[in-house]
Image (spheres, rainbow, N blue to C red):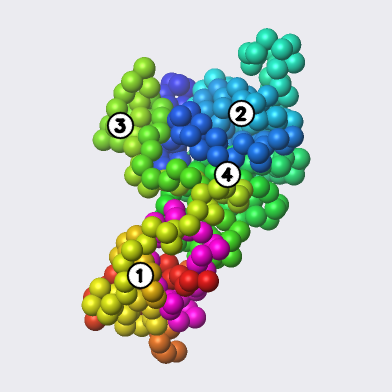
Amino acid sequence: MNSDRNKNRTLTSARKNKNDEFYTCLRDIENELKHYKPHFKGKVVYCNCDDPRVSNFFEYFAENFEVLGLKKLIASCYKNDDIDLFSNHDKEKAVYLVYEGDKNKNKIVDDEEIEVLPMKGDGDFRSDECIAILKEADIICTNPPFSLFREYVTHLMKYKKDFLIIGNQNAITYKDIFPLIQGNKLWLGVNNGAKEYVISEEFAKEFPNKVHRTDDGKSYTKMGNTCWFTNLDIKKRHEKLESYLYKEYNDADYPKYDNYDAINVNKTKEIPVNYGGAMGVPISFLDKYNPDEFEIVNANDIRVNDRVPQKPHGLIKDTDGTINGKPTYVRIVIKRR
Ligand SMILES: C[S@@+](CC[C@H](N)C(=O)[O-])C[C@H]1O[C@@H](n2cnc3c(N)ncnc32)[C@H](O)[C@@H]1O
């Protein structure tokens, strides 16, 4: 009876948070983290949305603790005090784990080297307990719940933390995220685009159409548009996009918007080599964005007249982004420096 009730609760929470319960593959973490190595030396890393035994973030940092030269690794579970399970969000309490390296020098992350400590609360990243750990940490690295992404980023900004996190590409267009990108306080990481994520068996049963493949007893879903978001500097951010551009500007291929003083560019690689004004480019431009070459303009600043409504997100979007009355996709406005 009781277990039925618990199961129902689990499924209800899975249904409610279906976009929150996908788990990052180790190879994706390794592929991204190799570009940030110098940032981690002597640092305290906190994974604050991570059931440690299921989270590959915890596994990656524990296994690479010495290689990265970390000082300390902390991970906290959300509404979960069983470190071997996916969070079912059916516990009122949580635990957190601390790892301070391979003390017995056997080159293995031993269970007895991982300290499991109880939390008074449920491990919500916004709780006082988690904030106390956050303050101690230098770099926050995780895949946070998608449904709380804006709040999560605002939280990290408030505490002035360095971070490397995963989020949906659509987050770029959020009114509280885009200004951070525009102000060069947040940018995309290296490997953006389609990725596989591990899903729990409950989730796979409840949403069979989301299962992309099953392998080694694990079910995977595929998401086409997830990105790494960070404020840690990376080499990619300084690579020259200009050297790949080849097209010359002409009126026919680059029409102006009806309501904004900018030309429309359909593909990043088609940014015209000889145009000095404002250009509306797809949001995927950010994958190639080098702030030394281009600046990101707030579309409100290039409205053709005051009757064009001010947009809280500062992008060319909705019906205002038309060309001869025909809507275009969402666009970021850029200008050459
Ligand atoms: C997208 S999953 C990713 C899990 C893990 N970080 C990974 O990458 O494999 C998001 C995780 O955030 C947890 N979560 C949801 N709400 C949370 C909250 N308010 N505070 C902390 N964690 C939360 C969920 O339980 C879930 O495990």
The residue indicated by pointer 2 is: 61
Instruction: Left or right? Give the position of 21 relative to 162.
Output: left
Question: 332 or 135, which is in the foreground?
Answer: 332
Q: Tell which tag, 4 or 1, sits nearer the viewer.
A: 1
- Does label 3 or label 4 sit earlier along the sequence? 4
Q: Residues within 10 Å of mark 3 (few under 14, many from 20)?
A: some
User: How far across and how far down the image is residue 61, in percent?
Assistant: 61, 28
Identify which residue is drawn at 64% across, 50% down.
Answer: 156
Which mark, residue 164?
A: 4
Residue 229 in the image: x percent, y percent?
A: 52, 49
> What residue is rendered at 47% in x and 22% in y?
2
Which span of residues is magenta-colored? 276-302
Of residues 26 and 255, the one drawn nearer to the viewer in this rendering = 255
- For badge 3, the amino acid type reads Val
Depth check, mark 1 against mark 3: the one in front is 1
Q: Residue 212 appears at what percent x and percent y?
A: 29, 32
User: Between marks 2 and 4, how big is the CA–CA gap?
Assistant: 13 Å
Per the image, label 1 sits on a secondary structure element best described as: loop
